[in-house]
Amino acid sequence: MEDRIQAEAPPAIRVTHVVFDFEGGGLESMVAAMAAKFRGTTVATSLITLGGRVGRLGAATRERFDQFVVARPTRGLSMLLPLGLAADIRRTRADVVHVHSGSWYKGAKAARLAGVGRVVYTEHGREHDDPRLMRWLDRRAAARTDVVVAVSTRLRDYLAGAVGVDAVKLRVVHNAVDTSVFAPGPAPADLRAALKIPPDALVVGSVGRLEAVKAYERLVDAAAALRGRLPCPLAVVICGDGSLKHELRARAERLGVGDQVYLPGWTDQPVRFYRLLDAFVLCSRSEGESVSLMEAMACGIPPVVTDVGASAEIVGGELAAQVVPAGREASLPDVIAATLRRPPPDRAALGAAARRRAAAHYGLDGMIAAYERLYREGLAATAAEAD
């Protein structure tokens, strides 16, 4: 009988994520999903949040992390000399520090002060107005970073060309979602009733921060523009919190669609919300690689997106008609109308195509494997240099 050779398990490593806040959002949801996947494996995951609070998402997911540290906010020289954050990183005994958007300069510098040998940074997306000072700081942060990950090829090219990050350090790792969790299912009648959406209404909506970059006023305006153009009443539901909530509500009232626009706030059950929709609308001015778009597509919901960031790439060629071209954002109501006027079987076919695209290209396992390779390759190189 031939001897069976078992593959040796990889050595245990400790990865500490540094995020600005853990209140909620695509970036934060992705980190939480990574922690869930790595739990119980040879990759121990810790998290440090700089916002001074656990956050709503943190409260819901903190048990996924080996350690969950709420850093004490500091002022003054903390950016130039982040000794407190360095001490927090040392306490997590990190082999790798993985910094995310909003924390790059401070996180990378603190990791080096803490003596961590491997620093990975993920750029999840740039604001449409990218100040020169921020780009200068990012170049300084990149000098302290071993690998700079962009979530799309478009973003990688921007980091190399506009920001000035050394191309040798750049990698592309697409965002991803758990397609076993975000999956098609029946529309929740109880949620529809709780929101008081009319039974005959078509429902479009989105999930995200109620901030200027998300441009949700475009969706409110679309509701007004579509009056009388659809075979059924229209309901617009935008889940999320932010500084523009009251402004969006006032805009809807001013345009005469206050009874059609629903702003229920944060949702900790996004799957149920996505399944309520006849179309998911991402109308942002700027995006990196939208996790909420991937989630909705994985749930089999037809998307409508503006052509920013990687949104058109996520949607793919088969659904190219669902993309509002750059510079033609005023045509958003037309694309929504074309989607909702389709017979239900045709909308179902759009949703099925969206699900296939998400499952084939944006499944969580591929992203997890890619990041683990980045973590381990760097540690192996460090060990080889020591030898």
Image (cartoon, grey):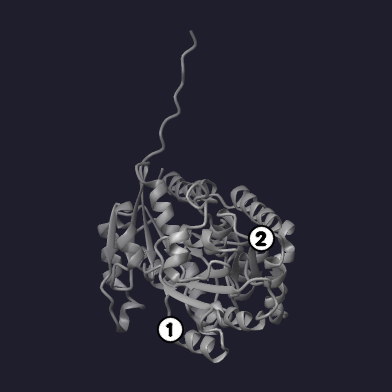
Q: Position of residue 88 (x, y in %)?
A: 27, 64
Whether residue 120 is visible: no
Question: Could you say which is closer to the camera, residue 69 or residue 77?
Answer: 69
User: Mark 1 vs mark 2: which is more N-terminal?
Assistant: 1
Q: Is residue 153 above or below residue 15?
A: below
Horizontal side of 86 relative to 273 (left or right) equals: left
Mark 2 lies on residue: 315
Number of disc labels: 2
Question: Could you say which is closer to the camera, residue 233 or residue 123?
Answer: 233
Question: Could you say which is closer to the camera, residue 327 or residue 257?
Answer: 257
Please state which amino acid type lies under the numbered disc 2. Answer: Val
Q: Is residue 56 above or below residue 258?
A: above
Q: Residue at x 43, y 61 (%)?
A: 190
Horizontal side of 256 relative to 378 (left or right) equals: right
Whether residue 92 is visible: yes
Q: Quadrant of the C terminus?
A: top left
Please state which amino acid type lies under the numbered disc 1. Answer: Ser
Q: Position of residue 80 (x, y in %)?
A: 36, 78
Res. 243 mark: 1
Residue at the extreme top:
1
User: Within the image, what quadrant is residue 47 found in?
Assistant: bottom left
Q: Residue at x 37, y 41 (%)?
A: 41
User: Within the image, what quadrant is residue 216 found in?
Assistant: bottom right
